[in-house]
Image (cartoon, grey):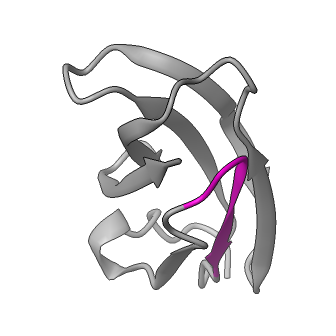
Amino acid sequence: PTGLPAQDMMNHSIKVYPNPTSDHVILEFAPVESEHLSAALYDLHGHLIQSFFSQKPMQRGVHVLPLVLHSNIPAGSYVLRISNGLGSRCFRIIKY
């Protein structure tokens, strides 16, 4: 369908795994319409650690995307933020 507004991220089914992880996570989601997504990793102070993609066009349907963490990121807790312009969802990621 065209002409429909993008859905708020709260209505999206999103999975992030494995968690904890040593070097990557898998982002799995299925938008019901085409939209542009951004994904970035932040430390617990809100500082950007790594941007995976910004305003990437995604068609409707199931997407399974590997997000590889930079090797110089130290072990610890981080926040993965997925956004589409209308809202965002955050997931705590533990790197070991």
Residue 76 position, x and y percent, is 39, 37
Q: Please say if 11 is above or below 25.
A: below
- Residue 11 shown left or right of residue 71 in the figure: left
Q: Is residue 50 visible?
A: yes
Instruction: Please tell me whether residue 25 belongs to the stretch shown in magenta.
Output: yes
Q: Is residue 1 left or right of residue 57?
A: left
Query: Where does the image place residue 57, in percent across and percent down from the top left?
Result: 76, 49
| Residue name at image x 28 percent, y 72 percent | 10
At a point 53% along the width and 34% down the height, the residue shown is 40
Is residue 8 visible in the rendered image? The answer is no
Up the image or down, 7 lies above or below 85; here it is: below
Q: Which residue is the extreme one toward the left?
A: 45
Residue 41: horizontal and vertical position, in percent?
A: 49, 34
Q: Quadrant of residue 68?
A: top right
Dominant secondary structure, magenta: strand
Q: How many marks?
A: 0
> Which residue is pictured at 64% across the width and 48% down the height?
36
For the N terminus, give its image quadrant.
Answer: bottom right
44 vs 81: above or below: above
The span picked out in magenta is 21-29
Of the pair 93 and 30, the residue shown nearer to us: 93
Q: Position of residue 80 (x, y in %)?
A: 44, 46
Q: Indicate whether residue 88 is drawn in magenta.
A: no
